[in-house]
Amino acid sequence: MTRESRKRLFWVCFVCSLVVVGLIPVFTQSEYLLRLASLVILWIGMAGCWNITSGYTGYIDFGPVVYFGIGSYATAIAMAKYGSPFFPAVALSGIVAAVISAPIGLTTLRLRGAYFAIATFAFAETMRQVALEFDRTLGVSFFEGSHGITLPMPDHENTFFFYCIFVVTVAVVLVHYSIEHSKFGFGLKAIHEAEDAAEIAGVNTTGIKLRAYVTSAFFLGMLGGIEAYWITYITPADVFSVHRTVQMVIMTLLGGMGTFLGPVVGASFLTIVSEILGTTFVEYYLIMVGAIIICIILIMPKGIIGTIKDWKGLRFI
Amino acid sequence: MDTIFLQAVINGLLLGGVYAAYSAGFSLIFGVMGVVNLAHGELIMLGAFTSYWMFQIWHMDPYLTAPFSAAFLFVFGYFIQRYIINRVIELPHIMSYILTFGIHLIVANVAVKLWTHDFRTITTSYSGANAALMGLNIPYARLATFFLALFVIALLWFFLARTETGRAIRATAMDKEVARLMGVDIRKIYAITFGLGAGVTGLAGAAISPFVIIFPEMGLEYTIVAFCVVVLGGMGYMPGALWGGFILGVAQSMAATYLSAGISVATTFLILFFMLVFRPTGIVGKGSVA
């Protein structure tokens, strides 16, 4: 296949799958299935955000959840305290997350390896503690501490949230596509392969890393805002939970880090497996997740997509 | 210098000793293999549970059970490294983080199955007893653990500096390829290192068992503190665990005394964050930078 025809095939597949997924709410009557589908695409979006920063560059971000949490709080505060409508609040979430991520990225992205991972992790935990303790320490009523914030009850159906999440996730996937086919993306991959060499070759490594970091923070913020309104109740322990970070990492890893389809495959697989295991074997669920993680790492460290690529010499897109 | 201030400093130092005790193993494992062991807290949990059951069944004093905890965890750590972590040691480090997270999930949740979610404590004759000294209170148990921590770190340092195996471990940490050429069986050294780190941690778990709440999910919190301590002191630099522990302990105790108990945790992470950004080699500058 030539490059052109491959590209055409990709777009055909892409649009077809969008239509199929986008029509789920039309065909299903079951609210449960709809919520499950929303959850799957929410996780695809979140894992995708992690993949943008960490998957392509190899900088392991252990605190992406912080921008999800910031987004949730931005929407919650804007809606519950200032009576803002939903869409401006979500846009605000994305912007707040992006604005906060810029100085954080600028300082932490100078660190490498485990140090970057720990610094981002520390930042996420700090923000969780700040959200928990801010009010009590200063005697104000803003983050509401461990009580959490209750958002106004939405008068929308699940379908509405499905499409909100769907739009953001599609945007994330499109960002992946542009990464695969742009100078920006080559820069990110060069950082992964050999950062010093890339720098010598004239790649603005810090700028590129920062761009990826801020982009993923922006989308995570929006997803956080949407989920906050969907669930209508947020607490610091929930939206800043380290388990969300771990989920993002594991899903991407399972699918294949730094690949276009990795987060999509990994998040779909793991969310559905968790749903099945979580309802059938409630008591052994976390043990099984642990075992699955270990098996993936030992058997196919490149993830599902990476392994298929190696195995058949197949190239996606 | 009022009594409250002094008391805060003493509490901080005692707490710091405890922190140092259970972070030394983390530092050792990272320094030699570059593995950030996210299952570290589970090693502490297992150590504490070993003491708990020996206390319950044979009424042994928790401090006397420490060698048994250490031995059990050494064997546990040795096999984990030998049969699981060694398989990914040549891959990018991210794999080992995630692998150890998987181990964390399994160990913590199997422990929940075995021992339920109950909170447990070990109540000994000296629990809650204090030495009163010029208006200051010094809890006996914490003081004992403090000295035990110093002793353990000294022992570990001695082992690394003065024995043949210790020399092999240090050589592997410096340059594993050259160590291999010199005839060091690195995989075995890795297994021994992890066992050693786990053993020390299990001992620390036994040593803190008289005054902490023991439950299967206690681990993650301890892993996080160990992170902070080790970064503050310098990754892979053994006496750094003491420095880091003391700084963190005093800072937390000050924040808890003068601000609020909740904010002291945020202080920890702020210190950690700025430390990483401005001085990643640790407070005395002897840690390794990846």
Image (spheres, coloured by chain):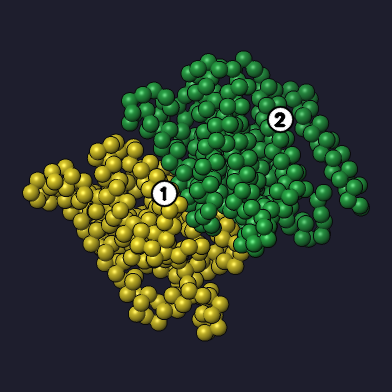
* Residue B239 placement, left or right of A110: left
Q: CA distance from mark 2 to mark 1?
A: 37 Å
Do the CB atoms of the residues marked 2 and 1 lie less than 8 Å apart?
no
Q: Which chain corresponds to the colour yellow? A: B
Where residue B189 appears, as percent x and y from the top left, is: 48, 75
Q: Identify which residue is drawn at 30% across, 66% down.
A: B152
Circles 2 and 1 on the same subunit = no
Is residue A248 visible in the rendered image? The answer is: no
Where residue B264 appears, as percent x and y from the top left, is: 33, 41
- The chain ID associated with circle 2 is A
- The amino acid marked with disc number 2 is Val
Where residue A160 appears, as percent x and y from the top left, is: 68, 22
* Crowding near the residue tagged with mark 2, few <14, some 14–19, many ≥20 C-alpha atoms within 10 Å: some
Q: Which chain corresponds to the colour green? A: A
- Give the labeled residue for mark 2: A167
Examine the image and state in which quarter residue B26 appears: bottom left
- Give the labeled residue for mark 1: B274
